Amino acid sequence: MAATVKQIWDWLEEVSDPEIPVLTVTDLGVVRDVDLIEDGALITITPTYSGCPAMNEIEENIRVVLSEKGIQNIKVKTVLSPAWTTDWMTEKGKEKLREFGIAPPEGSSSDKSVLFGKAKQVTCPHCKSTETEMISQFGSTACKSLYKCTSCLEPFDYFKCI
């Protein structure tokens, strides 16, 4: 019996992001499309940013999971356009980030209020306070900023809106 597109999407839920293992590649929205091809599947992915060091590992992990499910012919195609955006993250993925102690992206990538001098209001994933401040534009990975909550005094990563 050949796999269906839905089955393949479900199986991709088992592929974790190497940098943030609580997220899957589908939570992140890096899997753009699944197509059935002769004896297999073509998976189209988009990196979170063009220099993302995790993409080779993500591609290999996709191959491993689908191979374990019996897919013989696995092709992974990387596309850079349109560029990935945090708007592609699932709400489930954002909740997983929050539970893991990382503040998920707030708002939409189309929010340009920072251009007008308005600081982004980021909610602390620990105590839920909005009394937070950015410590560094760069956190534990390039896609995160380091924040501190002025209420509970805990530091935390914020997954930047891109």
Image (cartoon, helix red, strand yellow):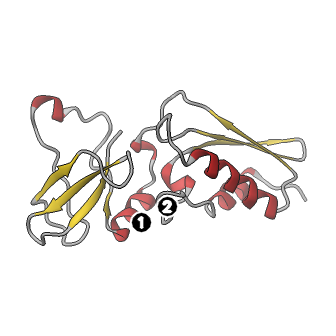
Amino acid carrying label 2: it is Leu
Task: Report helix, strand or loop for mark 2.
Answer: loop
Local secondary structure at mark 1:
helix
Quarter assignment of residue 108: top left
How far from the left and from the top, in percent, is residue 59?
67, 48
- Horizontal arrangement in the rendering, residue 88 relative to residue 46 (left or right): left
Q: Quadrant of the N terminus?
A: bottom right
Above or below: residue 151 compared with residue 7:
below
Compared across the picture, whether 18 is left or right of 151 comes to right
Q: Residue at x 16, y 50 (%)?
A: 121
Q: In the figure, 111 relative to 65: above or below?
A: above
Q: Quadrant of residue 101?
A: bottom left
Residue 78 falls left or right of residue 160: right
Looking at marks 2 and 1 on the same chain, the residue that comes earlier in the sequence is marked by: 2
What residue sits right under mark 1 in the picture? Answer: 96
Measuring 69% from the left and 36% from the top, which residue is drawn there?
Answer: 77
**Image position of 79 with respect to 19: above or below:** above
Question: Label 2, label 1: how many angstroms apart (C-alpha)?
Answer: 7 Å
| Quadrant into which the C terminus falls | top left
Q: Amino acid at mark 1?
A: Lys
- The structure residue drawn at horizontal position 61% and vertical position 61%, both measured from the top left corner, is 13
Mark 2, residue position: 23
Asked if the residue under mark 1 is in contact with the one under mark 2, i.e. CB atoms within 8 Å, the reply is yes
Q: Horizontal and vertical percent for residue 128? A: 19, 68
Q: Where's residue 43, x and y in %?
A: 70, 43
Q: Position of residue 42 (x, y in %)?
A: 75, 41
Residue plotted at (10% across, 38% down): 118
